[in-house]
Image (cartoon, helix red, strand yellow):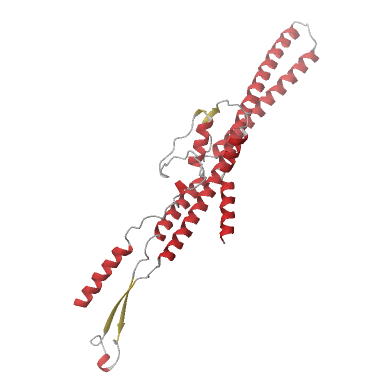
Amino acid sequence: MMAVHRCLAGLLLLLLVGCASVPEPGGADAAQLPGRANLGRRPVPLTTPRPRLTGELTLPQVLDAVLLGHPQLTAQELAMTALKGDQQQASRWPNPELGLGLENFGGQGEYGGTGAMERTLMLSQEWLSQSKRQARMGLAGVALFQATLAYQEQAWDLRGQARQQYAEVQVAQRRLALAQQSEKLAGQIQEGIQQRLAAGEVSAVAGSKVAVEFNTAKAARRRAERELAGHRQALAQLWGETPPAFERVTEVPLVVDLPADGALVARLAQDPRVVSLKWGQELCLAQ
């Protein structure tokens, strides 16, 4: 019995050693990776209900909503969280294994029953050298780094799509405003022609021609409304909202000046695709 107690005490000690915290490998945290751009994503819990965007939206609101609500980014963020757990697990000792062996029981003669049964309690602990632990932590860090680059690349692409859809909505709003003005003007002209037609100042042909122009303007206005509704729907889908609750977007300049050459090169150097290519080249050279 004393031997069993000693084994159990040794097991408890190894469990405490195996589960003890080990400092995380430096430089592998996704928040400190080189080339990481500030994409403006706030640490909002996934279970937190996000309010619907209503009224008139600005471009920063749209970009923030896309980063917070797009399903692909949410899935990649969950994958990065899992990889962070793998990275922490890689820096720790493997769990010890406990086994129990039973012999010499259930036989015949003196080995019948359990009177002659031998019990063997086995406890094993895998020993990892420092180099092997470093290799495991390095692989986990590389996996997390690649997932971070994939997340950033997806976020940059979605920001570009959001800007494009925002511009589409803005252009559709302008087209609808012009179509409404054209319809209003055509209606005023038709009303004036009908008054002159009733007074006998113009012919019926002129009245029919103005009626056709009014119907054409009315059809153009309806087409502009449908186009605006489609672009609003496409924009709201980028943050997972259907149907869209916002009414319009704020006007922003559609044409902007490019930055200076030095600033442009610096921005391109922070692009996740460029960073991924650089790291891929370094890995190939190291191999």
Name the spot of residue 14 as percent of width and height, x first.
Answer: 29, 67
Q: In which quarter of the image is the N terminus?
A: bottom left
Who's the residue at 68% across and 15% down the image? 185
Q: In this view, does 87 lie above or below 128?
A: above
- Which one is nearer the viewer's eye here, 55 or 103? 103
76, above or below 183, in the image: below
Question: Where is 16 relative to 215, above or below?
Answer: below
Q: Which residue lies furthest to the left in this view?
A: 2
Q: How many marks?
A: 0
Q: Where is residue 79 in the image (x, y as percent from the top left)?
A: 47, 52
Where's residue 217, x and y in %? 70, 22
Which residue is drawn at the image coordinates 80% and 15% (left, top)?
Answer: 205
Task: Give the left or right position of residue 199, taking residue 159 as reference.
Answer: right
Q: In the image, what residue occupies the spot 69% across and 12% down?
A: 191
Residue at the bottom extreme, as displayed: 109
Spot occupied by residue 100 in the image (x, y as percentages of width and height): 31, 77
Q: Is residue 131 above or below residue 167?
A: below
